[in-house]
Image: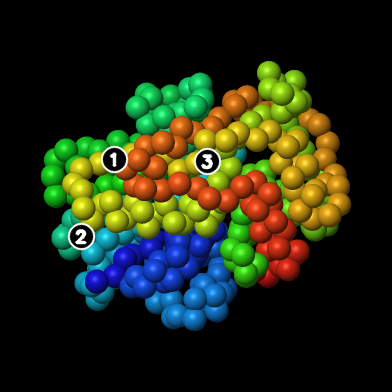
Amino acid sequence: MAILIAGGAGYIGSHTCVELLNAGRDMIVFDNFYNSSPEALSRVETITGKDVPFIEGDIRDRAALDKLFSENDIDSVIHFAGLKAVGESVEQPLKYFDNNVTGTIALLETMAKHGVKNIVFSSSATVYGAAQPPLSEDMPVGDVTNPYGRTKFMIEQILGDLCASDPQWSVVLLRYFNPIGAHESGLIGEDPADIPNNLLPYVAQVAVGRLEVLPVFGDDYETEDGTCIRDYIHVVDLAKGHLAGLDYAYGHKGCEAFNVGTGNGYSVLQIINAFSKACGHDVNYQIKPRRAGDAPSCFSDPRKAKEILGFEAQYDIARMCEDIWRWQSGNPNGYGK
């Protein structure tokens, strides 16, 4: 029996593949390489010394999905196959609803057809909207501010309704906070296809000379240094959280949500300072006006994942920055796209 990793060549997906293979799990990757690279899977093979079976395809392609499930003995799915750029989702909302929501429905219907009813879904802390931190799973969700977050909320609702309609389903919703870091080997890491949308890959690209200056949006928030505070989790910790979520799904029915964060908040300037120490030189940044929709502070209450999944993040912010720098300095152009 194999685990299907939808979107397994991406940033979080590739790191999860490493953890699954190192844990002796059988898996198969399904990815259209829209915002990822086959090179990432080749490097996963180098890290683990194991083959990575993969099929190129899109989760909206029902015929390809049906063929995939017909020809492989799949018992569960980890679903990473979603578009994730907030700004792009505002500019192209239909693209996001089509890929994220329509694609997920096609995946779920194919799973049901083949009797596969275990899934770990890559959700997001954006479902909490502008709620005040620390954010816990019992807080209301759905007051989201952009189409990307709305697709995550909608998929959570779809999965909840699916479990209510059929008690044989096992669904784990992992609400990520801010994944950063890279594998300690420096062989795999985050490689945005365009200008980075998130803070850390932008910092890393400025530090390596690929970009000139980091824009810092606002220094007048009601925080210690005036810049926004976020909860950052190492991508390897996050990958291990998926194994814990999958093991939980095997033993429990229904739909359950878990935060995957550290519970610690760091400001933009604290991150810049930590990264400057990791790379050995200052990172050039420039203060810009506030960006619409940015909350002053967002961090998790991670206790539920610790108590129920037995999962707790291990890496601190210094290690996260060191691992990013090892990846970026060794791969200044990412996977070479």
Tell me: residue 321, above or below residue 269. Answer: below
Q: Amino acid at mark 3?
A: Thr
Mark 2 crowdedness (10 Å alpha carbons): few <14, some 14-19, many ≥20: many
Q: How is the image coloured?
A: rainbow
Decide which of tag 1 and tag 3 comes sooner along the chain. Answer: 1
Disc 3 on helix, strand or loop?
A: loop
Vertical arrangement, residue 8 with respect to residue 39, above or below: above
Number of numbered discs on residues: 3
CA–CA distance in space, label 2 to label 3? 32 Å
Whichever of callouts 2 and 3 sits on the residue coming sooner in the sequence is 2
- The residue beneath circle 1 is 256
Mark 2 and mark 3 residues within 8 Å of each other at the beta carbon: no
CA gap, disc 2 to disc 1?
Answer: 18 Å
Q: What number is the disc on residue 27?
A: none
Q: Which residue is mark 3?
A: 262
Does 95 sit left or right of 208 as displayed? left
Question: x, y percentage for residue 95?
Answer: 47, 46
Q: Is disc 1 in contact with disc 3, using a CB cutoff of under 8 Å?
A: no
Is residue 157 in view from this perspective? yes
Q: Circle 1 sits in a helix, a strand or a loop, which is it?
A: strand
Q: Residues within 10 Å of mark 1 (few under 14, many from 20)?
A: some
* Disc 3 packing (10 Å; few <14; some 14–19; many ≥20): many
Q: Residue at (48%, 22%) from the top-left corner?
A: 131
